[in-house]
Image: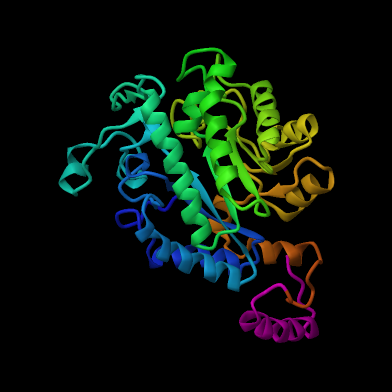
Amino acid sequence: MCQYSAKDGQVTDWHLVHLGKFAQGGAGIVFVEATAVERRGRITHGDTGIWEDAQIAGLRKVAEFLRSQGAVPAIQLAHAGRKASMARPWYGNGPLTGEDHARGDKPWSIVAPSAKPVGEGWITPRKLQAGDLQHLKEAYRQATRRAHAAGFDIVEVHAAHGYLLHSFLSPLSNEGAFEERTTFPLEVAKVVRDAWPAQKPVFLRVSSIDDVEGGWTIEDTVRFAKELKSIGVDVIDCSSGGILGSATAATRVLVPRVPGFQLPFAETVRRETGLRTMAVGLIITPKQAEEALAAGRADLIAIGREALWDPNWPVHAAQALDADPDFARWPVQYGWWLTRRETLLKKQGFKRP
């Protein structure tokens, strides 16, 4: 979950503590938020970046701590495209205004596959040309190299939520046939796969559907995923929406936002392509997550806002599913105390609700 709290692309102590909590809480993988492969690819002035070597050290500190707590350190490689140069969410989550300028957050020029803005009042992007595309592929290549140097074990190419690569894919933001719209995202995926160590997995996040009439469909995603499989992408992270605004918006959508509403996307891609999938989207309870895995609907479950609500969700889930009666999955600094409290509570006949 983007924190919009970086300093000129550099992670801060906020990110270390924020991400470290999830590793302490038992998460198997912890992803650093969408991290810009070039400066103009930031969503806001507060986005994390991986566009220069000076940013490696801060990211390495995060990766090392995550690993020390038993989590696999991972990072999303991203470019905001036509959704770049935005205000931080708590300042409006839209185009930058005069108030943002007064705070020092001034707009910058942005790029996209077409000169179509996200909506009325948004910055019109400059249409990318052939030379720009080569530059961007090199940016992804160098970002991948930096992610490895920083010690991450998984990279995820962010091609969802209306950002640059998604805006190539969707017919609502790009012109041409399916093959034309998917060419550049596939080239980027190949650049990342080739630059990343063969033994380390590459994930790719998609908006499985645009959730808007005339947009990208689940059938498109399946077709795209088959191409990604041939390139060597290991996992498809199946989200949805965002092409015309926030991926979290509950308006103008075709699929109701109910618990587990995106699980069918992960299930379909997994069944139709044989690729591993990661499911996201209002997966809230341990029982809900475990049932999805047991039924083969997905291979991994990603927790976002629920982890903000409860950073210890994984270890709490292990307790709820009777998988860790002795608190062995907790950091030893916590588990030592909790086992003794649990013994006392049992003697008193206390039962958790």
Left or right: 81, with 22 as reference point: left
Q: Is residue 272 visible?
A: yes
Question: In the figure, residue 230 lies in which quadrant?
Answer: top right
Give coordinates of residue 201: x percent, y percent.
65, 50
Q: Nearer the viewer, residue 187 or 83?
A: 187
- What residue is drawn where x is 54% and y is 17%? 180
Asked if the magenta segment contains residue 337, the reply would be yes
Question: Bounds of the magenta span?
Answer: 329-353
- What residue is drawn where x is 15% and y is 46%? 102
Asked if the magenta segment contains residue 198, the reply would be no
- What residue is drawn where x is 68% and y is 66%? 315
Give coordinates of residue 54: x percent, y percent.
35, 60
Left or right: 293, with 26 as reference point: right
Q: Extreme right residue here? A: 295
Left or right: 279, with 124 as reference point: right
Q: According to the image, what is the colour scheme of the structure? A: rainbow
Q: Nearer the viewer, residue 309 or 14?
A: 14
